[in-house]
Amino acid sequence: MPLPSIIMIVLIILAVGIAAYSLWIKFKVLLKARKKDNRFDRMGARIWALIKIFLAQFKLFKEPLPGLMHALIFWGFLILLLRSMALIGAAFTEHMHWSIFFFSEPLAGWYTLLKDITELVVAGMILVAYFRRWVIRPWRITQSRDAEFVLLLILLLMVTDFCLDGAWMLTYAKTPEAAFEAEWAIVGPALAGIFSGASAETQTALFHVFYWAHIGILFLFMNYLPHSKHFHVITALPNVFFSDQKKGYPIAIIQDIEAEFEKEEPLIGASRLEDFSWKQILDIYTCTECGRCLVNCPAKLTEKWLQPKKLTEDMKHHLYKRIPQIVKGSAGEPPSLFAAIGEGLEAGLEEEQGREALWHCCTCRSCEENCPLCIEYVDRIVDMRRHLMMMESNFPKELTLTMKNLENKRNPWGLGTAERADWCDGLGVKTLKEDQDVEYLWFVGCAGAFDDRSQKVSRAMVKVLNQAGVSYAILGNEEGCTGDSALRLGNEYLFQMLAQQNIEAFEKYKVKKILTTCPHCYQTIKNEYPQFGVNYEVIHHTELIADLIRRGRLKPQNPLDQKITFHDSCYLGRYNNIYDPPREVLRSIPGTSLVEMKRNRQNGFCCGGGGGRVWMEEKIGTRINHMRVEHIKEVDPGLVATACPFCLMMIKDGLADKSLDEKIKVLDITEIVANSLEEKA
């Protein structure tokens, strides 16, 4: 057997063996995950996600130029995988040349041309990447020697391939393979001209030096990846494939929570890495530290302790330190996960601040929307909140009253259940108990029933529904909080209790269609309640109003004569992709001039009230609703339209805090529509 073949066999065995062992160790960590997670459903959607997000790099193009740079490197990497296979195969051929397209000369020729163009583009993009890191230095990117080393390895792969091509064309110049290659290649022939002045022995030596250098760098790259931040080169494909494909991105509930509490070691939330699911650990492996999760994060941009990228980075460092103990299943108390995510905040307070940071999340999902590799944050944060809430009773003090009110009164305000329908006294609104022969159950929600400002929205909704002739009824005193805040704040037990009470009422009256005026109620009933074995057709009031206007059942007539901007609710938009109906409604009103804030639709900015934050004080940094008010000021509207009671509260308070409440008004879309309707005779 020729010496090159023997060397290649030895290198393959060593390189593949070491890489396989490294990957097996990391895979064993996934096997140690305690939380169950089924990600083998919805195969069609998963394949489409691979095509759109992994192959087409769709999410990267939210930032066009950096996105194109990274996409070209990635696409080049895929194209050049074939070249790497061909170079490995070349060690087993007579003239050290083999094409993956050996069965078709035209394909082999066109691939040779494509390969050269691709390598030139990739090399150029690597230089651009260095320029961005060393000169532009974007704030969201973590500067690291690791990243620079990986870029250097990729660049060296391009350079050594060009050089070995040129030297090979001289060394085997008289062979038909060299003549064919020279006909199609671009760079190789040019380098052959440069090397042609050297002796035949030097040309041959150059070829072998560049060839084995390329192979060595290739195998080094393969073995370095599992230990670097560029491990995502390997994990990106499975992470995208196994990403959450459920509509509405529901938070997975704890099944049979009573039985879980009775176990000797109940798994309620997460305080250790092993408490996560295998997909949550895969997320930690996959983070590229690109910082795209930060570009629209309300916590980061208002200087809170929570930063999605840092959260995952800290978990990754903690994970890599603990891999030997996790794999071996070592006994003893593991280091605190909360201390790990608090590293770098304030020395000596890491664990306390790590816990505190988790409560800064608004669960707006902007981080997940912007992550190019589908890393999921909200479920992971909620799992850690569950542990703090239910296992440690360690949560912000102001939530004590909220939880007590939800448990005893079924609403966060703590007002009596008997008062739940007082808002509609004298309006003739029926309850399902009085009339079940209706099309919609209108789930009013706690804010619509108890909050003074949101009660005005509820009364406006009555006018809209009545004028359109919609058949509806409410639950009245039988309605309770959906449990949205309890779920996202980690009080799983309370959430399930509240959910079951509402479901019993729905089933009692054989409810089929539910109308909501709150995106949080919409999200919880539509996307989380089905985990209890029920399914309802849920519609948000902006969807219904838009449909009624389209069908001519509502005819806005009174002109608004206002410059208006619409604030997207995170739970209506990013969670449920409802962006157009609210805007359609606003445009239907005479005299409306609709202007968009810079951060809108998928990139809309949170009001600061989601994830239970509406019940907590902001003690650190800028208030999130104040930052949103600054965005509103930029477009100088006379009116802000909302479609969520939390957004209405937060923006109203923000405008008042900035002394802008006289200049800029804020109304729910329902109120705007109601004001535009002619009174019935």
Image (spheres, rainbow, N blue to C red):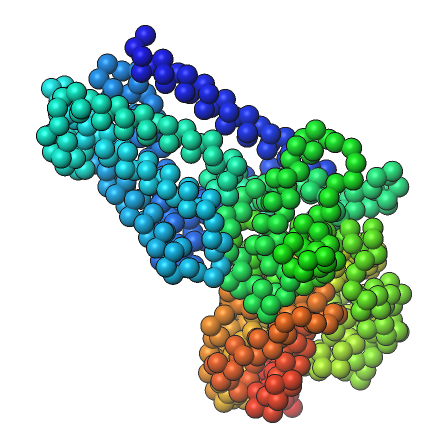
Query: Where, by quadrant of the figure, is residue 608 drawn?
Result: bottom right
Locate the C terminus and report the quarter of the image it occupies.
bottom right
Above or below — where is 78 with respect to 674? Answer: above
Foreground: 499 or 651? 651
Above or below — where is 565 with respect to 71? Answer: below
Above or below — where is 485 with respect to 191? Answer: below
Total marks shown come to 0
Residue at image coords 32%, 29%: 213
Instruction: Give the side of residue 43 with respect to residue 258, left or right.
Output: left
Residue at image coords 54%, 43%: 286
Whether residue 2 is visible, yes or no, is: yes
Residue at image coords 86%, 44%: 261
Residue 148 placement (x, y as % from top left): 41, 46
Residue 508 placement (x, y as % from top left): 83, 57
Foreground: 364 or 571? 364
Locate the N terminus and report the quarter of the image it occupies.
top left
Whether residue 585 is visible, yes or no, is: no
Query: Where, by quadrant of the figure, is residue 515 drawn?
Result: bottom right
Toward the top, the furthest residue is 1
Residue 259 placement (x, y as % from top left): 86, 41
Instruction: Give the side of residue 95 with respect to residue 614, left or right.
Output: left
Residue at image coords 52%, 82%: 633
Residue 436 placement (x, y as % from top left): 79, 65
Foreground: 212 or 651? 212
